[in-house]
Amino acid sequence: MIVRTGTGWQYLLADLSLILFMVTAAALAQTDDKPALATLSPQGEPLALYRVEAGAPPLGTWLHDQSADARQQLTIIAQYGPGQQADALSRAEALAEQAGEAGAKARIVIEPGQGGTTATLAYDVPEASMARDLQKPGADNSASKDKP
């Protein structure tokens, strides 16, 4: 019996790859080229909410009244209507400057919406997620079960 090389699973995999390519190309050819709708940015559940309204205390005062935690992040959200993006950005920058004077770093989110500006504190600092904070750089993280 003579066995020919290259007649096994390689051809099957190549055929399946070509089929996948053709199905993907056909699906992409049928899609509309409409721009994607803007969606809200993913954020953690807010612990505290600050709204920019008449009679509200300054953001720095509000921040000093909140409990400080390194895992919390201040997010300033400025929503805008049609043609009001520059105004929303200037409102958010003003709040970020107030937060900086109070010693807090802020993430700014500018998004289409009803209008208005809010600031939230939430446990959504990217570096403080899950158990990565438990591991300190240079620490011996090996299992100590077998060590005396």
Image (tube, rainbow, N blue to C red):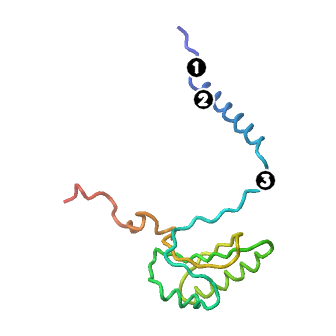
Which picture quadrant has residue 28?
A: top right
Left or right: 92 with respect to 122?
A: right
Label 3 close to label 2 by CB (< 8 Å):
no
State the residue in front, 33 or 81.
81
- Find the residue positioned furthest to the left: 148
Q: Residue 114: horizontal and vertical position, in percent?
A: 70, 72
Left or right: 108 with respect to 112?
A: left
| Residue annotated with mark 3 | 34
Between the residue at mark 2 and the residue at mark 1, the CA separation in whole angstroms equals 15 Å
The amino acid at mark 2 is Leu
Crowd band around label 3 with a 10 angstrom C-alpha radius: few (<14), some (14–19), many (20+):
few
Between the residue at mark 1 and the residue at mark 3, the CA separation in whole angstroms equals 48 Å
Which numbered disc flags the more N-terminal residue, 2 or 1?
Answer: 1
Residue in view at x 41 percent, y 68 percent: 133
Crowd band around label 2 with a 10 angstrom C-alpha radius: few (<14), some (14–19), many (20+):
few
What is the secondary structure assignment of the residue under circle 1? loop
The amino acid at mark 3 is Lys
Q: Residue 5: horizontal and vertical position, in percent?
A: 58, 19
Which numbered disc flags the more N-terminal residue, 1 or 3?
Answer: 1
What is the secondary structure assignment of the residue under circle 2? helix
Residue in view at x 69 percent, y 70 percent: 111
State the residue in front, 85 or 134.
85
Left or right: 98 with respect to 124?
A: right
**Quarter placement of the C terminus:** bottom left
Between the residue at mark 3 and the residue at mark 2, the CA separation in whole angstroms equals 34 Å
